[in-house]
Image (cartoon, rainbow, N blue to C red):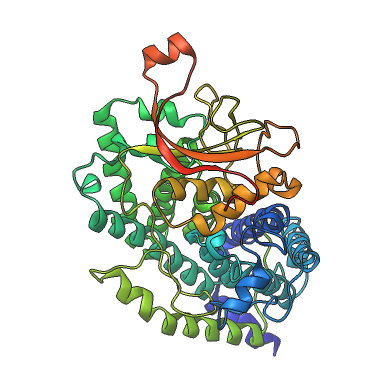
Amino acid sequence: MDWLGGWLGGWFGTADFGLARFVLQRGIAAIFLLAFVSSALQFPALLGEHGLLPVPRYLDRVARPPGPTLFRWRYSDTLLRTVAWTGAALGLSVVAGLPQRGPAWVPMAVFLAMWLLYMSIVNVGQVFYGFGWEILLLEAGFLAAFLGSNQTTTPAVTLWLFRWLVFRLEFGAGLIKMRGDPAWRDLTALYYHHETQPMPNPLSWFFHHLPRPLHKVEVLGNHLAQLVVPFFLFAPAPVSTVAAAAIILTQCWLVLSGNFAWLNAATIVLAFSAVATPAVPAVAPGGPGMPTWFAAVVLAVGALVLVLSWWPLRNLFSRHQVMNGSFNRWRLANAYGAFGSITRDRLEVVVEGTLGDPRGGGWMEYGFRGKPGEPGRMPRQWAPYQLRLDWQMWFLALGSPGLNWFVPFLNKLLDADPATLGLLRHDPFAGERPAWVRARVFSYRYTTWAEWRGSGNWWVREPLGELVPPVSRGSH
């Protein structure tokens, strides 16, 4: 059957996309590695046995989780850490190129294992794992299982599936913007976005102060990259390569201007599926053919995704377009989108505690790692790592329902819980229990150039009121 494998490799595979496979496999694995490490470090405090939204309590409450999970019948923090560190080790092995050296079934098994392990985490992660880049990583990880190994040529069908994923990701985001907020249509969205985005980075202040005409050019460029360029991903090379380069350039601009976890990094990696290069054996080796069984599996996966794509395709052209949603329990062929509406004013929830009488002074502020806090503290770079608590604090300030986890968070602070304090940058009481805690709402805006030069502050903030009045242990 060697002749059949060679014929399939010549007709079914492509030698011009070896670099694409190299980047896709290692890039997706690197993001899995980051996601698993993030879960190992943050999940127990947020969702563990004694977390803010304990998984055992969640599983007792729901009829069934939104998808398959290893924790359906048993959860423990030890099992969670075992799953997370196992997934991280698998991701590291692909980054190092080890599974790719074997037959095609080896990287397939490794990627499917990472997909199932991370899906187990996401499906019990509740609000802390309710982001579009979670299902994006799951779908990308599933497709990466069918890229083959160094012993096979790169399957063309799998590359087309990746391009279809990038198309949904970008075109869906473009449509949701145009449908969702007039600021995208009149090109004024970036008058606000750099200041009000969930987690600014060190350059966001400077991007905000760019001339307003340039902000309009940025928005127009974004529309072109998301509403026009994605169609050219399906064109022959070199047109597809140019389209991928335009998407990658746009994503790099977003990396410079904000912290969006691994969304931008994943988009950059996935866009390489359309990058055609001459064969570079030293960088991306590939065999001349592929096993018949592997070709059959790839075709079957292609047919499966084609069938499942009916739902996201219909969603793209719906007036009630869903943003970041799954249409099946396996998190495949999803709908994507981001920032369908732009916040005009920035609100922040500031958490404080005191050791004394709440009617007196002595209130001190808890410091978060990523979200804005003290006006003089420069925003930090965290992406592609995700600070899940900090992201939820942004949604909380917008008025999204969050007291189901926020009240337990305040209780943990009253108990000086070490795991919860470990999620923070600064505990003003150095591990001592405060007598009272409270949450206040502030308006935030960037300083002007003159204010920044005069004070060194990045933010100006004004108190607006209380979200949660002073509470103590046993008072609620």
Tell me if 72 is positioned left or right of 328 in this view: right
Reply above or below: 264 against 72. above
Q: Nearer the viewer, residue 149 or 203?
A: 203
> At 49% from the left edge and 67% from the top edge, which residue is drawn?
162
Residue 279: x %, y % from top left: 60, 58
Q: Nearer the viewer, residue 120 or 475?
A: 475
The answer to which image quadrant residue 59 occupies is bottom right
Reply above or below: 270 against 117. above
> At 23% from the left edge and 45% from the top edge, which residue is drawn?
183
Location of the N terminus by quadrant is bottom right
Residue 446 in view (yes/no): yes
The answer to which image quadrant residue 197 occupies is top left
Q: In this view, which residue lies farthest toward the top?
A: 454
Tell me if 7 is positioned left or right of 442 in this view: right
Q: Nearer the viewer, residue 373 or 33?
A: 373
Residue 91: x %, y % from top left: 72, 60
> At 26% from the left edge and 70% from the top edge, which residue is drawn?
317
Reply above or below: 187 against 202. below
Residue 298: x %, y % from top left: 57, 81
> At 64% from the left edge and 30% from the top edge, which residue is drawn?
356
The answer to which image quadrant residue 56 occupies is bottom right
Residue 401: x %, y % from top left: 44, 57
Residue 120 in view (yes/no): no
Tell me if 197 is positioned left or right of 298 in this view: left
Reply above or below: 143 against 215. below
Q: Nearer the viewer, residue 84 or 96?
A: 84
